[in-house]
Image: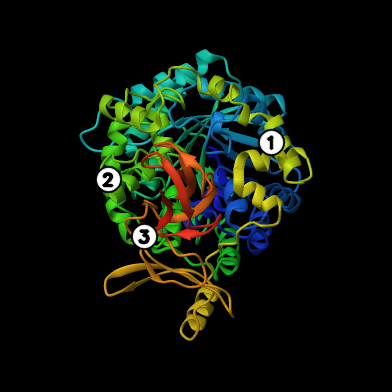
């Protein structure tokens, strides 16, 4: 009797990189491993989309479309190259207009994609309809997704087999086109018995001719058991990764699953141990200089209590390291359960997982519910679609008051389409203003990545890759010479933000409480009593300065916008008055509590 063929998608170069390195891997460093994977007989790859679209522009000074073209050239025309999309969000954290959703599908087809796996974190099928239509219109295969997770203990109301059956029936009843169905568990928390019953339910509902897949992560330690349960229930395809970006926060290793199914009636992609060993050896050589975050290699038994996807976990810890607040990570993870419970049980997968993390971070840094993260607040207010269950009414009220938005039941796509800022015309005009070449690729890059996309297109993108050789070099240089930049130092228990520059350049040292510690040639901050100090609530970067010195503002007016942990944080006037000084510049790094402006 012939073994059942199971399609294997290698997630190494998309989800593997995202789950382990926060997506920060340079294309020329990993392309030799792509060639090795091809030689090993792998023909189905996840190669882009998801957070691996934005991360290239945010951190790598690389063009995702160029990477996709080169990847396709390596693997040849017949490989199934798959990307990940988030329904109305496509590869953005915010919702897109119909024009942007169409442009996403068009550009990804142009640059080598075969299949787009398309999900909505709220399992709101309304958010899948239009994107599914445009994906198929442009000649791509559409893989429709039901997102999964286990709820924290004591939580009830969604994420049961019955809930997934309802979602699947909604997909079927909607008439949206699909070529395959995937059950996607980004946090890896779905227990194996639920996985078995879910796949069994789907097979019964869809029949034998529909290709059904399972995607999970090893973060909670049950991924192999979940895959074995899915295979027993009749799944047709599973996702795996190659070492050193397998296991831990990523997918199970290819070798691990070949061993787990040894002697059973499954043929995993026709793959052979020896060839996979050779491929993994090449991949390890390609990545040997990359800093491996310790949390990326670990199985965490507490993840089911606070479901955090592997792909988001390391991205967030990388950003916390960047901002000097990594010591807060355990508290943030512990705070997530309440955030998930009160937020309406959207699946913990981007962008909802990011909303959960941002709100948990705010609750830890600023006090419970003192500052509603914009994404989380808009989610509970209904701006991204319908949550699986109704959010906590008190949190909805707080979000409405803080964000000055009323709850809505309008479709997310209709809201996005009515926003002029999300039109192609808006972004074409922005490119003209910046004297950037107008191409469809550049329009989409700018729309998807906003200011960081514009910075990339102007040749001003940030390079932030953690390589061991560079870290050692920085440590060696730092032992004798502090480089230029922004630093936070502590003197007698008091924090200071220090700007350091080489040569005779002016520098400024500012106490985090706003008092000038060592006034230099730069204009000093206003003395106590002369104005109201406006401080940064979180560490991050100055994204945009809205108000200018001498300008009159009202209470609540936005003075500047900070970027922290993928959030845009408005810094607002605490009362009416006149801006006496702006103490920072665009792109400056700021620390928690630093005075960024003074209001008279």
- Given the current orientation, which residue lies at the most extreme bottom position? 480
Residue 82 relative to residue 20: left or right: right
Q: Could you tell me which secondary element the residue under label 2 belongs to?
A: helix
Q: Name which of mark 1 and mark 3 comes first in the sequence.
A: 3
Q: Is residue 207 visible?
A: no
Q: Nearer the viewer, residue 558 or 82?
A: 558
Residue placed most toward the observer, 230 or 169: 169
Q: Earlier in the sequence, mark 2 or mark 1?
A: 2
Compared to residue 202, the image places residue 354 above or below, namely: below
**Which is nearer the N-term, disc 3 or disc 2?**
3
Query: Where 484 falls versus 137 (above or below)?
Result: below
Report the Cα–Cα distance between label 1 and label 3: 35 Å
With 599 as the anchor, is 272 left or right in this view? right
Camera-side residue of 579 and 423: 579
Is there CB contact under 8 Å for labels 2 and 1?
Answer: no
Q: Which residue is mark 1?
A: 427
Is 488 situated left or right of 21 in this image? left
Q: Is there any visible trace of residue 330 in the rendered image?
A: yes
Q: Position of residue 458 (x, y in %)?
A: 71, 53
The label on residue 483 is none
Vertical comparison of 207 with 341: above or below: above
Residue 10's spot in the image, x, y percent? 57, 48
Q: CA distance from mark 3 to mark 2?
A: 16 Å
Question: Does dot 1 land on a helix, a strand or a loop?
Answer: helix
Name which residue lies at 49% across and 21% down.
Answer: 125
Q: Nearer the viewer, residue 11 or 430?
A: 430
Residue drawn at the location 34% of the way across and 55% of the way down: 299
Q: Which residue was labeled with disc 3?
A: 325
Name the residue at 52% across, 82% down.
477
Q: Hey, which quadrant is residue 141 in on the image?
A: top right
Instruction: Give me the C-alpha separation between circle 2 and circle 1.
Output: 38 Å
Numbered badge on residue 335: 2
């Amino acid at each position: 009797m012939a073994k059942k063929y199971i399609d294997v998608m290698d997630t190494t170069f998309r989800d593997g990189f995202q789950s382990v390195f926060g997506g920060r891997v340079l294309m020329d460093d990993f392309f030799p491993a792509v060639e090795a994977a091809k030689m090993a007989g792998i023909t189905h790859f996840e190669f882009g989309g998801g957070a691996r679209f934005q991360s290239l522009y945010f951190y790598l000074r690389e063009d995702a479309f160029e990477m996709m073209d080169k990847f396709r050239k390596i693997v040849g025309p017949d490989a199934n190259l798959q990307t990940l999309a988030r329904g109305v969000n496509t590869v953005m954290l915010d919702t897109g207009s119909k024009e942007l959703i169409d442009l996403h599908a068009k550009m990804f087809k142009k640059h080598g994609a075969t299949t787009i796996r398309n999900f909505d974190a709220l399992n709101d099928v309304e958010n899948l309809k239009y994107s599914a239509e445009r994906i198929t219109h442009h000649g791509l295969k559409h893989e429709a997704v039901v997102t999964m997770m286990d709820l924290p203990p004591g939580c009830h109301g969604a994420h049961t087999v019955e809930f997934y059956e309802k979602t699947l029936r909604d997909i079927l009843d909607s008439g949206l086109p699909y070529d395959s169905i995937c059950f996607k568990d980004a946090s890896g928390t779905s227990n194996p018995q639920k996985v078995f019953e879910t796949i069994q339910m789907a097979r019964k509902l869809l029949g034998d001719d529909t290709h059904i897949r399972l995607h999970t992560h090893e973060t909670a330690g049950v991924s192999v058991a979940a895959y074995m349960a899915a295979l027993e229930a009749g799944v047709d395809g599973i996702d795996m990764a190659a070492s050193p970006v397998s296991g831990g926060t990523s997918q199970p290793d290819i070798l691990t699953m070949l061993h787990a199914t040894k002697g059973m009636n499954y043929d995993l992609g026709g793959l052979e141990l020896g060839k996979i060993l050779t491929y993994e050896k090449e991949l390890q050589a390609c990545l040997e200089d990359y800093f491996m975050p310790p949390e990326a290699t670990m199985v965490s038994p507490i993840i089911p209590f606070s479901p955090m996807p592997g792909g988001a976990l390391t991205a967030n810890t990388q950003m916390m390291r960047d901002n000097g607040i990594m010591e807060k990570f355990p508290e943030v993870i512990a705070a997530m359960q309440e955030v998930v419970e009160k937020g309406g049980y959207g699946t913990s997968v981007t962008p909802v997982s990011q909303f959960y993390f941002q709100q948990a971070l705010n609750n830890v840094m600023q006090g419970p519910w003192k500052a509603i993260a914009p994404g989380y607040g808009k989610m509970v207010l209904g701006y991204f679609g319908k949550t699986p269950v109704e959010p906590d009414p008190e949190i909805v009220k707080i979000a409405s008051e803080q964000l000055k938005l009323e709850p809505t039941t309008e479709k997310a796509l209709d809201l996005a389409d009515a926003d002029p800022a999300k039109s192609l015309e808006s972004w074409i005009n922005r490119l003209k203003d910046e004297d950037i070449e107008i191409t469809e690729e550049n329009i989409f890059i700018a729309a998807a990545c906003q200011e960081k996309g514009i910075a990339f297109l102007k040749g001003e993108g940030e390079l932030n890759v953690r390589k061991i050789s560079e870290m050692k070099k920085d440590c060696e240089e730092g032992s004798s010479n502090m480089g230029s930049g922004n630093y936070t130092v502590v003197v007698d228990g008091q924090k200071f933000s220090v700007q350091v520059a080489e040569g005779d350049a002016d520098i400024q040292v500012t106490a985090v409480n706003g008092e000038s510690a060592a006034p230099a040639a730069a204009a000093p901050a206003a003395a106590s009593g002369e104005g109201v100090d406006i401080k940064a609530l979180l560490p991050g970067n100055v994204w945009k300065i809205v108000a200018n010195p001498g300008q009159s503002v009202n209470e609540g007016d936005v003075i500047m916008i900070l970027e922290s942990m993928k959030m845009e944080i408005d810094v607002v006037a605490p009362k009416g008055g006149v801006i006496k000084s702006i103490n920072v510049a665009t792109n400056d790094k700021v620390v928690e509590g630093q005075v960024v402006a003074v209001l008279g």
